[in-house]
Amino acid sequence: MLEVSYIYFSISEVFQVVCAVCDTKQPIGKQQFHCDDCGICRVGGQENYFHCEKCGSCYSVTLRDNHLCVENSMDMCITGSVIAIM
């Protein structure tokens, strides 16, 4: 039989949490949320963002239907190289 233990903390004792989805450490108080479509945690409150399916990224709700949409623009690989945009 599985034994479950609970540990209770005062909020003043907690400085970071771990995302249950992507297992990354997050500071508290920044309104973090995990975007399943992006696959990462973001800050600023989920109610303030929407995920653009065409671009593949989250944007402020103030940009809904008003952002320059580039299909799959966020599907790039970060390699450590510097990319110059001219």
Image: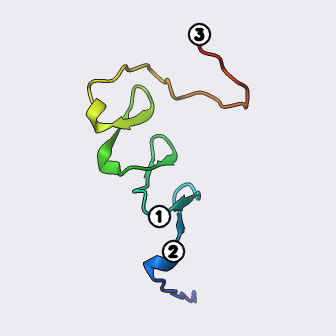
**Residue at 66% from the left image edge and 20% from the top image edge:** 83
Which comes sooner in the sequence, label 1 or label 2?
2
| Label 1, residues with CA under 10 Å away: few <14, some 14-19, many ≥20 | few
Asked if marks 3 and 2 touch (Cβ < 8 Å), the reply is: no
Which comes sooner in the sequence, label 3 or label 1?
1
Q: Is residue 39 above or below residue 32?
A: above
Q: In which quadrant of the rendered image does the C terminus lie?
A: top right
* Location of residue 8 in the rendering, given as x and y in whole percent from the top left corner: 48, 86
**Residue at 52% from the left image edge and 57% from the top image edge:** 21
Q: Amino acid at mark 3?
A: Met
Q: Amino acid at mark 1?
A: Ile
Q: Dot 1 corresponds to which residue?
A: 28
Q: Nearer the viewer, residue 2 or 85?
A: 85
Residues under labels 1 and 2: Cα distance? 8 Å
Q: Dot 2 corresponds to which residue?
A: 14
Q: Nearer the viewer, residue 10 or 7?
A: 10
Residues under labels 3 and 1: Cα distance? 38 Å
Report helix, strand or loop for mark 3: loop
* Location of residue 71 in the rendering, given as x and y in whole percent from the top left corner: 44, 20
Asked if marks 1 and 2 touch (Cβ < 8 Å), the reply is: yes
How many marks overall? 3
Asked if marks 3 and 1 touch (Cβ < 8 Å), the reply is: no
* Location of residue 23 in the rendering, given as x and y in whole percent from the top left corner: 58, 59
